[in-house]
Image: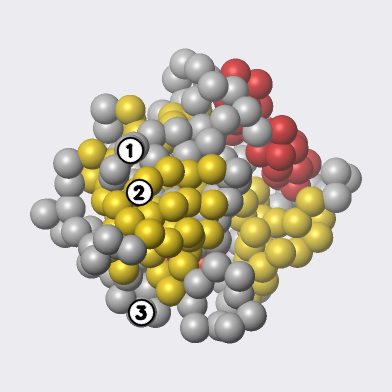
Amino acid sequence: MKFPEPLIKGRLIRRYKRFLADVRLPDGTEVTAHCPNTGSMLGCQPADARVWLSRSNNPARKLAYTWELVETGPGLLACVNTARPNAQAREAIEAGRIPELRGYLHCRPEVKYGDEKSRIDLLLSRHDSEPDAWVEVKNVTLNESGQGFFPDAVTTRGQKHLRELMAQAALGDRAVLFFVVNHTGIKTVRPADHIDKLYGQLLRQACNAGVEVVAYRADLGNSDGNPTGALALTERVPVILEA
């Protein structure tokens, strides 16, 4: 999976109102880009950071640019566009690169389910020997010395998703929490108990109730810390649940 067009580099001036970011392009032009991330983006918006934007040719769009990548430290890249992880996970699953989820013939996105009126990111079905798999995808970009943490802010929505997954597991289906690690510096993934203690408690409860947890890192950049244009999930990352 790759970005459809080459990305445009710039320098971050500021992010504001959650969905807006001012960026200085190499020629000195300042543009306002859409920031497709509702989270805190903790650690992903350092001042004057190198950033990369995509550009849309759709004349109906108010903002032509979308913020895609950021350099969070020397040679470290993160994908901040939270519209990407679902597609990254689906592409990897359908390509057979996720051993835990191979063998399903059908993959449907955004299926309604659960008592709390949720939508599952991906519903996998038609396996020869496995029950349907309900897959909830989460984007991990918070890096602390090589440890990835989720969430980066208190998430009542994420807590709800864990409850819904536990309910599906109780019905006999597979329930899977899929962490898409969109940061090249992250080596392990942990629940962010220091940010959302209840989420961490629910995640451990969900694992004990049969919810499966996997994490795979995206191939975002080369050894020089420059984007390759790729978004493919290439390497499994350990998930550590011990507090």
Which residue corresponds to mark 2? Answer: 12
Q: Nearer the viewer, mark 1 or mark 3?
A: 1
Which quarter of the image is occupied by the N terminus?
A: bottom left
Answer with mark 3 or mark 2, whichever residue precedes in sequence: 3
Circle 1 sits in a helix, a strand or a loop, which is it?
Answer: loop
Seen at 23% across and 45% down, the residue is 76
Q: Amino acid at mark 3?
A: Glu
Name above or below for residue 62 compared with residue 59: above
Which residue corresponds to mark 3? Answer: 5
Seen at 26% across and 27% down, the residue is 145
Q: Amino acid at mark 1?
A: Ala
Answer with mark 1 or mark 2, whichever residue precedes in sequence: 2
* Crowdedness near tag 2: few (<14), some (14–19) or many (≥20) residues, C-alpha within 10 Å: many
On the image, the x and y values in percent for residue 113 come to 81, 55
Which residue corresponds to mark 1? Answer: 47
Seen at 81% across and 60% down, the residue is 112
On the image, the x and y values in percent for residue 212 come to 56, 43
Q: Amino acid at mark 2?
A: Leu
Nearer-the-camera pick, 34 or 198 = 34
In the displayed structure, does residue 186 sit left or right of residue 65?
A: left
* Crowdedness near tag 3: few (<14), some (14–19) or many (≥20) residues, C-alpha within 10 Å: few
Answer with mark 1 or mark 3, whichever residue precedes in sequence: 3
In the displayed structure, does residue 58 sit left or right of residue 11?
A: right
On the image, the x and y values in percent for residue 111 come to 75, 64
